[in-house]
Amino acid sequence: MKKTTSKTAAKTAAKTTAKKATAKTSAKKGGKFSLINDLHEAIVSLASASKTGQVKLKRADLKAAIENSIITGAKRAASGERVRFPVIGVLARRDVKGRKAGKGVNPFTGEEIQVKARPESKKPRWSFPKTLKETFADKKNW
């Protein structure tokens, strides 16, 4: 049998506590998903204060809380909700229409080909905010 080191035990504990914190926050609301609120509640539940008043938070706990919040947001977006990530953009679900099978023409050879049918599907759609688009368009930043 393998011995579990204190580092691996701490990592698994951090992951489980972060998962519990984000699960509690998403179960409470039932309404719109807010990344900021979800992260805030997860971090507050994980942070501890020392005797001198300093707030201590393990890096592994913080990483797990951020990952779980983003995954929760992605799951909410997959269910059809429009999820806003501040400064970065918006994640939403896009419905792609189905397509019938048909015939097409190869433009190089002129030969007819069969085009396969495509079933309906749901795909993620990411849209960037105007400020981010302007930052990339500005030549000063190149």
Image: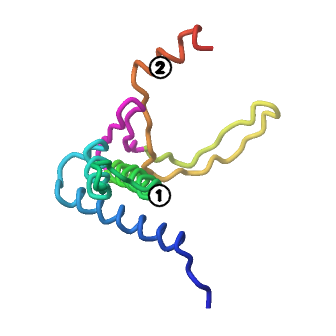
Distance Cα–Cα, label 2 vs label 1: 33 Å
Which three-letter amino acid code belongs to the residue tagged 1? Answer: Ala
Residue ID at (54%, 69%): 7
Q: Residue furthest right?
A: 109
**Which quadrant of the view contains residue 87?**
top left
Which three-letter amino acid code belongs to the residue tagged 2? Answer: Lys
Taking 67 as reference, is 17 left or right? left
Give, as a single range, the part of the protein colored magenta: 80-95
Residue that carries the numbered disc 2 in the rendered image: 133
The foreground one among 36 and 122 is 36
Residue that carries the numbered disc 1 in the rendered image: 60
**Which quadrant of the view contains residue 91?**
top left
Taking 120 as reference, is 25 left or right? left
Q: In terms of secondary structure, where does tag 1 sit?
A: helix
**Which quadrant of the view contains residue 109?**
top right
Residue ID at (30%, 41%): 82
